[in-house]
Image (cartoon, rainbow, N blue to C red):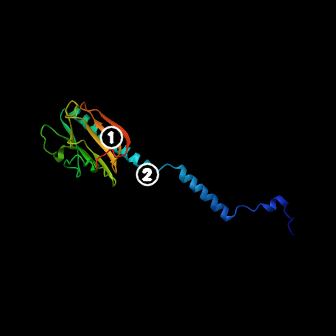
Amino acid sequence: MPLPPLPAPLRRLRGWSLIETMVALLVLGVACALALPDTRALLDRQRAAGARRMLSTDLAFARLAAIQRHTEVGVCASTDGRHCAGPEAWADGWIVYVAGRDRAPPAAADILRHQAWRAPPGWRIVGSAGRSRLRYQGDGRAYGSNLSLRICRHGHLLGRVVVSNTGRVRSEVHDTPGGCPH
């Protein structure tokens, strides 16, 4: 038995064609791409925040260790986890060590913590000119002038960690083009 014919309004509704569906998906994709933030900038901010947190945590750990042990504790950039490196090597990692009164490189037994932060290409953590290491006294104060560690990506300053003479660590968020040495 044949089916009765459909009413006139239902005969015209056949659904979406493939081309209409593809155009709708294309418009939706472009709208989503424009609505999302630049993911590279977001990733850069998160990496810089992570580096600031790691540096701040390890500097606070070094200060606390100096106070608890009543002795000098140092922090320096280190590429191998055993020896101190120059002020531009912070992007390869750093060590926290018991410094004592001598200025000799730390012995393996004196190293309290090693942070191996391997910076992505184009990233640098640069210390203050002439300051390759930081030394906390037994009372928590830091020797010398303020230490400033700048976190950079391709010469663009993204953040900074500053240690004052009193030993206080502060972290700053920046977004400054050209704020870092090349």
Foreground residue, 55 or 17? 17
Question: Is 12 left, or right, of 36 in this rendering?
Answer: right
x and y percentages locating residue 55 in the rendered image? 30, 42
Kind of residue indicated by mark 1: Arg
As drawn, the residue found furthest toward the bottom would be: 1
Dot 2 falls on a residue whose secondary structure is: helix
Residue 71 sits in which quadrant?
top left
Foreground residue, 133 or 127? 127
Which residue is at 43% across, 49% downward? 41
x and y percentages locating residue 72 in the rendered image? 18, 36
Dot 1 falls on a residue whose secondary structure is: strand
Q: CA distance from mark 1 to mark 2?
A: 20 Å
Residue linked to disc 2? 40
Residue 56 sits in which quadrant?
top left
Foreground residue, 97 or 37? 37
Above or below: residue 74 compared with residue 30: above
The residue carrying pointer 2 sits among few (fewer than 14), some (14 to 19) or many (20 or more) residues within 10 Å by Cα, namely few
Kind of residue indicated by mark 2: Arg
Q: Which badge, 1 or 2, comes first in the chain's sequence?
A: 2
Residue linked to disc 1? 160
Q: Is residue 60 visible?
A: no
Total number of numbered labels? 2
x and y percentages locating residue 12 in the rendered image? 79, 61
